[in-house]
Image (spheres, rainbow, N blue to C red):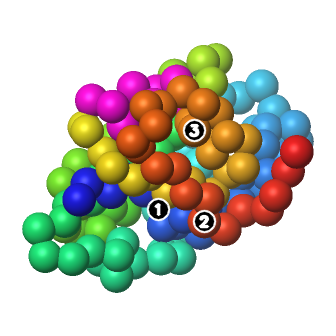
Amino acid sequence: MKIGFDLDGVLCDTDMNFLRLLERVPPFQDDLEKMMEFEVWYFNERKPLLNPENFMSEGDEYYIITGRDNKFHGEVTEMWCRKFTPNARGVYCVGEYPKPVEEGKAKKIVELGLDVYIDDHPVSVRKLRAALPSHVKVIQYGGRWIK
């Protein structure tokens, strides 16, 4: 079985609301470079929430598909995943602002032929379930229920 995991909020302890708040306060407001430097530090310091190895049976493989932007967060994402998820078959940063992250995730899920994908965000779960073929199961883990 091929299983995909979202990173932030599933495998990695991340508070995206905190990061979005920082965009609105000095010294980060209107300084993208300084904000990106802080985000690299922030992401590098995150602790794991869930061990994907606990979901694996013999012959299974797992992938990490995150909405992080590869240009700004690709390197720190790869470093974190090498440290905490060394057996992942692939790590993919599919965020392409301003496109919705679900577009990139759905495309990569189909490309990899995943059977199951686990995400924490209820809106993403709903959109992915609508966009993906019916044989691909999308499971919500964590997060909270939002209409």
Residue 73 position (above or below residue 140): above
* Residue at mark 3: 129
Binning the other alpha carbons within 10 Å of mark 1 as few (below 14), some (14 to 19) or many (20 upward) gives some
- Residue at point 68% right, 51% down? 121
Q: Is mark 2 on a helix, strand or loop?
A: loop
Residue occupying the far left of the picture: 59
Q: Which callout, 2 or 3, points to the residue nearer the camera?
A: 3
* Residue at mark 2: 141
Residue 124 position (above or below residue 84): above
Distance from the alpha carbon under mark 3 to that under mark 1? 30 Å
Please provide the residue range marked out in magenta.
102-111
Name which quarter of the figure residue 74 lies in: top left
Q: Mark 2 and mark 1 in contact (Cβ < 8 Å)?
A: no
Binning the other alpha carbons within 10 Å of mark 2 as few (below 14), some (14 to 19) or many (20 upward) gives some
Task: Tell whether 73 sits left or right of 120.
Answer: left
- The amino acid on which the numbered mark 3 sits, given as a three-letter code, is Arg
* Residue at mark 1: 44
Distance from the alpha carbon under mark 1 to that under mark 2? 22 Å
- Residue at point 36% right, 37% down? 109
Residue 126, image x, y percentages: 67, 40
- Residue at point 43% right, 31% down? 133
Residue 32 position (above or below residue 45): above
Name which quarter of the figure residue 27 lies in: top right
- Specify the quadrant that holds the N terminus: bottom left
Residue 9, image x, y percentages: 61, 62
